[in-house]
Amino acid sequence: MSRHVALSAFLVTVAIAVPAGWRALDADIQSDGPALRPERQTLELDDASVTVDLDRGAMRSGDTATVTLVASAETAHEVTVDVTALQDMGYGGERVQNPPMQVGDKTIRLHAQPGGGPPAIASFKLGKHKAPLGNLEWIDFRVSEHGHHKGDSAAAVLGLATWSGNSFDATLEPPASIPSEGPFTVALRIKNTTKKPLANLYPDVGERFFGLQGLDVAPQLTNYSDADYKIEEVEQPKPEAAAAADSDNDSDDSDKNALAPGAERLFIYHVEPTHPGVNHFTFVAYVRSTNGGAMSSLVLDRPELPEPAPAVTALK
């Protein structure tokens, strides 16, 4: 999770506005999934280059993801590649990484030509619509030369998260007003809609998802060079009950700060843009708990700076 920063420094932007009829998770993933897609990758072959684009970075389980491929070469010719969908299977006993499970495989023939040939599409339906709530899976799409889709052969790899739906409520909320430049805040509101306390809440908020074999899937924060912003959770005073729990040195390992049924908790994040002039921002939140999980996304566009007034020259 992001490092904490002082609460007092950002009170001016902490006010949060929740539009009427704010979108539910399904609408978030359906509409914002393309904004969360990973960056284009390129497969370099001996006589051609193949660009690989994935149409989204997150989607509901049971939906369809699309991989688009374009081949370029100095001399026009045909190129054949394999597109393999691999589901991360996590760790097994003694923290040994399990091999991924192949959940799809297509062979695609491309026409390579100078400047890029016509695009080819490979579509994959992943998971089931009726999967248990709170279930997140990570899928890697591996594009390689035909007949070389296994082992350590050269490949372009892009991934996405599939999501079965929230087991409790989580909503990313925009600020009441967004400045034309400089930092601002967003908030993540979590509500326990279950009948049991939500223990060990762990929220991640970032620009897009990333996934590594055997590791937790979490939103990407600032660990890549082209990130549009840095994000840090604003440190908030703990309730008296939570502070008392922290000072309790008994052997009880239960989460004394669990979120009770019907209760809400607000996490506030300071956003520091990293590139001047960037006015379009994407956010995705993934909240883990002992009792399930939740996901939300948010796309913000802030107003552009007004054009400077032309200089006026006084007449003599």
Image (cartoon, grey):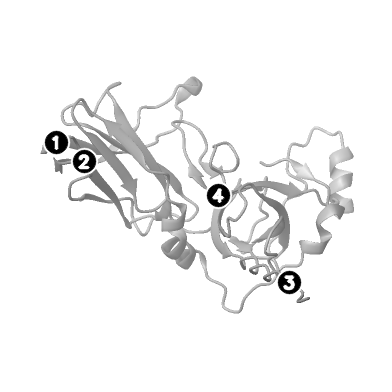
> In front: 173, or 9?
9
Counting from the top left corner in percent of width and height, residue 205 is at: 61, 49
Q: Is residue 50 above or below residue 130?
A: above
Counting from the top left corner in percent of width and height, residue 4 is at: 76, 43
Q: Which amino acid type is shown beneath numbered disc 1? A: Val
Q: Is residue 176 above or below residue 50?
A: below
Q: Which residue has dot 4 on it? A: 207
> In front: 148, or 266?
148
Q: CA distance from mark 2 to mark 4?
A: 29 Å
Q: Is residue 138 visible?
A: yes
Q: Is residue 289 left or right of residue 239?
A: left
Residue under the point 14% across and 36% down: 80
Q: Which mark is residue 79?
A: 1
Q: Which amino acid type is shown beneath numbered disc 4? A: Glu
Q: Which amino acid type is shown beneath numbered disc 3? A: Thr
- SS for callout 2: strand
Q: Earlier in the sequence, mark 3 or mark 2?
A: 2
- SS for callout 4: loop
Q: Is residue 139 visible?
A: no
Q: Which mark is residue 71?
A: 2
- SS for callout 1: strand
Q: Earlier in the sequence, mark 2 or mark 4?
A: 2
Q: CA distance from mark 3 to mark 2?
A: 56 Å
Q: Quadrant of the C terminus?
A: bottom right
